[in-house]
Image (cartoon, rainbow, N blue to C red):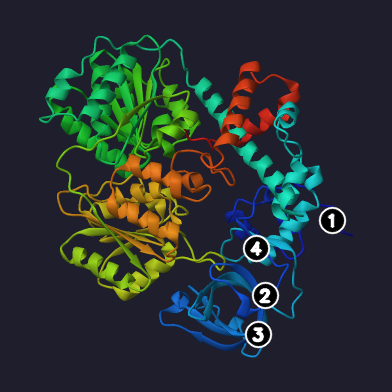
Amino acid sequence: MSTILSLESNITEIKGIGPKKAEAFGRLGIFCIGDFLRNYPREYEDMRNVKLIAGLKDGEKAVVEGTVVFNALGRGYGRKRTLHLSVLDKSAKMEVLFFMAGFMAKQFKNGSKYRFFGKVKVENGSVTMFHPSYEPADSDLETGILPVYSSTRGLSQKDLRRVSKQALLLAADYPEQLPLDVIEKAKLAPIAFALENIHYPTDTDAYKAARYRLVFEELFDLRFALKLSASRFGFGRQGVSFKKGDFSPFIKSLGYNLTSAQERALREIESDMNSELAMNRLLQGDVGSGKTIIAEAALYKAVKAGYQGVFMAPTEILASQHFESFTKDFEAFDINIGYLSGSLGAKDKREVLEKLKSGEIDILIGTHALISGNVEFRKLGLAITDEQHRFGVNQRKKLGDKGDNPDVLVMTATPIPRTLAVVLYSDLDISIIDELPPGRQAIITNRFNEQNRDSAYDKLLSEIEKGRQAYIVAPFIEDSESLQGYSAESLYEEFTRTYPGIKAGLLHGEMKQAEKDECMRAFSAGEISVLISTVVIEVGINVPNATVMLIENAERFGLAQLHQLRGRVGRGCEQSYCFLVLGDESEIALSRAEIMCQSRDGFYIAEKDLELRGPGELFGYRQHGLPQLQLADPVKHSSVLKLASDMADLLYENDPEQSNPDNKVFYDRIYKDYVNSDKLVL
């Protein structure tokens, strides 16, 4: 008896998907059949026309069917080795090159025919296809325009397409997600049509209509969620006035002058804090621009006006570093600093909580532990969140709820271009620190490729020999058959095998928080010389002895994120370096690298990011605290963003309590996907 499938059916109910493959799907966030409908393809393979090798043009993506006549692994170790094939059809011969392919050699037999799809390079009469998808020519080949999905270890495109086809059979059952009047006014395709044609487009027009619908929906959802976020944080409500407090004594104690940008930000914050209305301000400044001193000044003012302050950091190591610096900076002012984290012992934690409740602690610094239910302030007046994009709306709201509508200041080191901030942060007051303190050494940034990659490592090793430390960053946690590039795991294996005398550590997002904290603590303490990581280290760790940031497959990162990563070094008095290793020397990759080599101005880099990057990269890594946008690009789709924003604002104004029953499906989804899930982290 066959099982009747629904959108809620577990993917294991699909033939061929067992527990191991289900676990792999889980890593992609896909648990039931309906989840896959929102797992959009990252690109497409046009399998409609098989081309002859002799007719291929440089730079095109094409389908080629030919016989493998040569098969050999290149130099290297294990999975890192390249695989070289010679493929012959009736017109000519081409080379096929696979990277990170030590495991693939046995998948091709000389004399057998295969179908390849990939990008080709034609130079001086020779044709090379890089890391294509492939299938034996005698298998049941798919035709038409085929989706290519982001994958993970243990899943092939066949597995992914098998689930997508099953999910698409149920697309007609997928409930409409947007208010009907919005669909009508914006002239959007129905959701079922959009989902069917984003996965398997019937033609170009259908694809465009599907993509437009889904891009609009992402931007509409985002804008409405931002409106809800603003309303939940007390904008325009009665707040705390700190007129009795004064920055001056603290500023004079610093022993140096603030930059003009710091002074401007301080005046804006002072105006907010003196007001009777609650402050809700974003302090935006480049790495090393001096945001923390401004935060300290604001906390000083709050304490001297008779209130308590709280400062929340995303990691224990960063929170403890702030605790040490705050204690030193406030030493002369009779201000008591407390520290709270999950790893604090029960006795110490109890003592901190008692002192906080009695008012003996003036400023509490800590991690997520600050929002626990047993944390009570006597009189909280100012709540500050550092590296704000690491915290969700609900987390920050819980922190603010510890007081009676306290002033709120959130800080970010990611420069967001003003053109974009106007739309995304229209309900937040923004202070910008757009200059660095004088005297900071510029980080020397150099570009490398696969051919001279060893030179980058030689330079890194020379710094290690001097007693310095270094970061190596990879775009992926683990190797993938479908994604070309280095993984943190494979780099760690390679480095520890090649340089057994150098202590290295591995850090990535799938590790337990305690493991991540311990790894960062060991690196901060100098127990680890080289930290091999994914982008989890873009914020939250300050190691002045680290002088090298080496980024593998730098072409896979947006400019803004490259700049964030570079900001992890250059924090001490020694000369620091950033090495960008490109696996793909495309025009846009070279342009990015050149900008990084020439400039350290985060705002200039952010503006260039808007001009150069491909769709979604600015937001694809959530570096700005936004939920991931799969299809929408707020700059490329600026006209759609404007329309979606206007319509979302109108919906909110007409129904501020979200009580219209006609829009219940939409409201329920927004609260589930954004508000209650903490996906929105602005």
User: In 3D space, how far apart are the residues under numbered discs 2 and 1 (Cα atoms)?
Assistant: 42 Å
10 Å neighbourhood of mark 4: few (<14), some, or many (≥20)? Answer: some
Q: Is residue 14 visible?
A: yes
> Which mark is nearer the camera, 2 or 4?
2
Which residue is identified by label 4? 21
x then y, percent, for residue 54: 61, 80
The answer to which of marks 3 and 4 sits earlier in the sequence is 4
When the figure is inspected, residue 560 is found, relative to residue 59, above or below; the finding is above
Q: Residue at x 31, y 51 (%)?
A: 566
The amino acid type, in three-letter code, at marker 1 is Thr
| Kind of residue sitting beneath label 4 | Lys
Q: Secondary structure at mark 3?
A: loop
Q: Earlier in the sequence, mark 2 or mark 1?
A: 1
Circles 2, 4 touching at the beta carbon (< 8 Å) = no
Badge number at residue 89: 3
Residue at mark 3 to residue at mark 4: CA–CA distance: 35 Å
Q: Residues within 10 Å of mark 2 (few under 14, many from 20)?
A: some
- Location of residue 26 by image quarter: bottom right
Q: Which mark is residue 3?
A: 1
Which residue type does callout 3 highlight?
A: Asp
- Earlier in the chain: of badge 2 and badge 3, it is 2
Above or below — where is 480 with respect to 404?
below
Q: What is the x, y in percent for residue 388?
A: 40, 35
